[in-house]
C-alpha cells in the first residue's frame, strides 16, 4: 500500500539554524499538507499546497516558514531560523483531488528538536 | 475559532465495556467529519469517515447536525483499541483538516 514518507525521522538543530523537512507524498495525490504537533498538544494545521502554490496557511505559518515542491516527488518544509518553540512533531500529509469524503494520508512524522 | 472539540483528554474503560469518544464541531455549512486514530509509535491513520457510514473495527460514528456532534462509539472495547483518537473536519473546499485535541483511550484488561 502506498505511503507518505518523511525524512529524517528525528532532527536536532541549534536555535537560529535553518532546517528542511522532507516528504514524499503518495504519487497520484494532488494536495499536500504540513501539520505540527507540539508535545502534549493537538495536531495543528500549518499549510496546504495545491497546483504548485500555497492553498491556505495558518497564522503559525509566518515568514520563517516556506514550502516547496522542487521536483515531481518531494515536498519540503523549510524553517529559516529555528526557535525553541518550533520543537514539535511535523507531519506531512497528502490527498487526492478534494471531493466529498477524501481522506488525508499522513507520514510517520519528523521530530524536530531545537536546542 | 475552535472548530472541533473533544472534551475528554483521557478515557479509561475496562475490556468489554462500551466506549464513547465525544466530538463536537462548529462550522457553518456542511463539513465532512472524520475520525483518525494514532496507535503507539504509528502514524495518524483514518479510522472512519462520515460520508461512508461504515463500521471499522467495530467503531461507528453518527453525525448529529442538530447537536453538531460526531461521537465515536464501540459497544465492546478491546485492549488493542488503546490509542489516541482525533476527530477531524474538512470545510466544503476540502483544502485542510481541522483536528480536535485528541482523546487518549486506555482499555484496561
Image: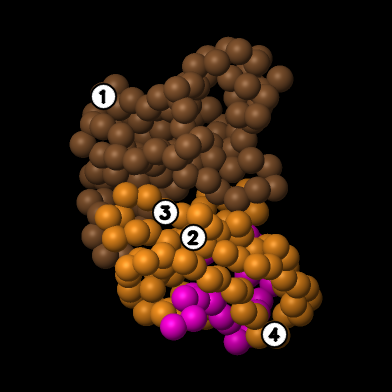
Chain colours: A brown, B orange
Query: Disc 3 to disc 2, how far (Cα)?
Result: 10 Å
Q: Is residue B4 above or below residue A37?
A: below
Mark pair 3, 1: CA separation:
25 Å
Front residue (pair A46, A112) = A46
Query: Same subunit under labels 1 and 4?
Result: no
The residue depicted at 63 percent of the width and 22 percent of the height is A83
Q: CA distance from mark 2 to mark 1?
A: 34 Å
Sooner in the amino-acid sequence: mark 3 or mark 2? 2
Q: Secondary structure at mark 1?
A: loop
Is residue A92 something that shows in the picture? no
Q: Which residues are magenta?
A: B66-87
Q: Residue A71: which disc? A: 1
Residue A1 position within the rendered picture, expressed as x and y whole percent measured from the top left: 36, 52
Q: Is residue B1 above or below residue A110?
A: below
Q: Under tag 2, what secondary structure?
A: loop
The numbered mark at residue A46 is none
Q: Mark 2 highlights which residue?
A: B3
Q: Residues within 10 Å of mark 4 (few under 14, many from 20)?
A: some
Residues behind callouts 3 and 2 on a single chain: yes
Q: For this view, does B60 lie left or right of residue B5?
A: left
Same-chain check, marks 3 and 1: no
Q: Chain of mark 3?
A: B
Up the image or down, B74 lies above or below B81; here it is below
Task: Identify the subunit bearing mark 4.
Answer: B
Residue under label 3, please give it: B97
- Mark 2 and mark 4: Cα distance apart in space: 32 Å
Quarter that holds the C terminus of chain B: bottom right
Q: Element under label 4?
A: loop
How far across and how far down the image is residue A68, in percent?
Answer: 33, 25
Amino acid at each position: 500500500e502506498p505511503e507518505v514518507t518523511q525524512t529524517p525521522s528525528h532532527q536536532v538543530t541549534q536555535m537560529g539554524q535553518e532546517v528542511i523537512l522532507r516528504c514524499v507524498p503518495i504519487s497520484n495525490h494532488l494536495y499536500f499538507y504540513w501539520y505540527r504537533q507540539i508535545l502534549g498538544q493537538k495536531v495543528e494545521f500549518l499549510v496546504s499546497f495545491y497546483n504548485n502554490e500555497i492553498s491556505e496557511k495558518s497564522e503559525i505559518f509566518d515568514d520563517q516558514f516556506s514550502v516547496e515542491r522542487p521536483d515531481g516527488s518531494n515536498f519540503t518544509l523549510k524553517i529559516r531560523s529555528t526557535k525553541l518553540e518550533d520543537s514539535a512533531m511535523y507531519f506531512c500529509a497528502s490527498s487526492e483531488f478534494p471531493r466529498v469524503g477524501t481522506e488525508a494520508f499522513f507520514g510517520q512524522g519528523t521530530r524536530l528538536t531545537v536546542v | 475559532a475552535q472548530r472541533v472539540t473533544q472534551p475528554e483528554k483521557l478515557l479509561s474503560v475496562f475490556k468489554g465495556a462500551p466506549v464513547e469518544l465525544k466530538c463536537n464541531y462548529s462550522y457553518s455549512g456542511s463539513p465532512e467529519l472524520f475520525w483518525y486514530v494514532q496507535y503507539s509509535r504509528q502514524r495518524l491513520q483514518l479510522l472512519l469517515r462520515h460520508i461512508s457510514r461504515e463500521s471499522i473495527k467495530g467503531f461507528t460514528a453518527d453525525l448529529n447536525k442538530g447537536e453538531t456532534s460526531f461521537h465515536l462509539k464501540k459497544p465492546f472495547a478491546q485492549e488493542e483499541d488503546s490509542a489516541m483518537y482525533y476527530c477531524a473536519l474538512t470545510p466544503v473546499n476540502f483544502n485542510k483538516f481541522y483536528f480536535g485535541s485528541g482523546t487518549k483511550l486506555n482499555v484496561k484488561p
